[in-house]
Amino acid sequence: MIFGVSFFFFYKRAESKLPKQPLILTPAVINQPLPQADLVNLSGQQLADEKLRKGKVVLVFTLIECEPCNEENEFLKTVIGSRKDVTFIYVIPFGVRDNALKLAQNKYVVETFFDEHSMLSRSLQIYQVPIKIFLENGIIKKTWIDSSFDDTRKAEFKAWLGGV
């Protein structure tokens, strides 16, 4: 018990010393085409490729049971409508497809898709969430890793989104 409490305290203290700035995925993915994706909705329909490869798109990688993701979702609800020229798409990269998508139905303000066989997340080496990836005509332009957990980060994300 003491070990668990000590570990939690040490972890939180170490975590608080980490720089809180937008990180990027492997720099090699920036300015590269989005890898092949097999994103399906609750009905089992695949997201049309042109929805990912035409115009400005933000992919939001999230998990239903992830508390930082849930907090980020509440924040994104206030931001999504601010850019009519940007399409937001939620992607659940891991888990059981039907269960995750059923729970997502009432939670997210935009349609949510499941990354079938984790094809896209493995290609992009996504192993944590939340992550947002900005695409322009199918090309990865920017990424935002982590949640916007305080007012400063929320303002930074709004500036990030405003700059796309």
Image (cartoon, helix red, strand yellow):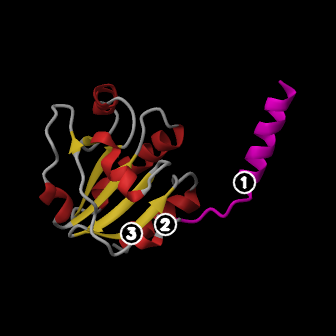
Give neighbour class at mark 1: few <14, some 14-19, many 20+ (Cα, 10 Å): few
Q: Residue at x 35, y 29 (%)?
A: 96
Q: Is residue 43 left or right of residue 141?
A: left
Residue 115 seen from this side: no
Quadrant of the rendered image containing residue 32: bottom left
Dot 1 or dot 2: first in sequence order is 1
Q: Residue pushed farthest right?
A: 2
Q: Which residue is mark 2?
A: 24
Residue ID at (28%, 63%): 34
3 or 1: mark nearer the eye: 3
Residue 69's tag is: none
Which residue was labeled with disc 3? Answer: 29
Asked if residue 15 lies in the magenta stretch, the reply is: yes
Name the residue carrying label 1.
Answer: 16
Crowding at dot 3, Cα within 10 Å, few <14 / some 14-19 / many 20+, comes out as some
- Specify the principal SS of the magenta part: helix
Could you say whether the residue bearing mark 1 is in a helix, strand or loop? Answer: helix
Q: Is residue 151 above or below residue 72?
A: below
Q: CA distance from mark 1 to mark 2?
A: 19 Å
Residue range highlighted in magenta:
1-22
* Mark closer to the chain start, 2 or 3: 2
Q: Residues within 10 Å of mark 2 (few under 14, many from 20)?
A: some
Amino acid type indicated by mark 1:
Ser
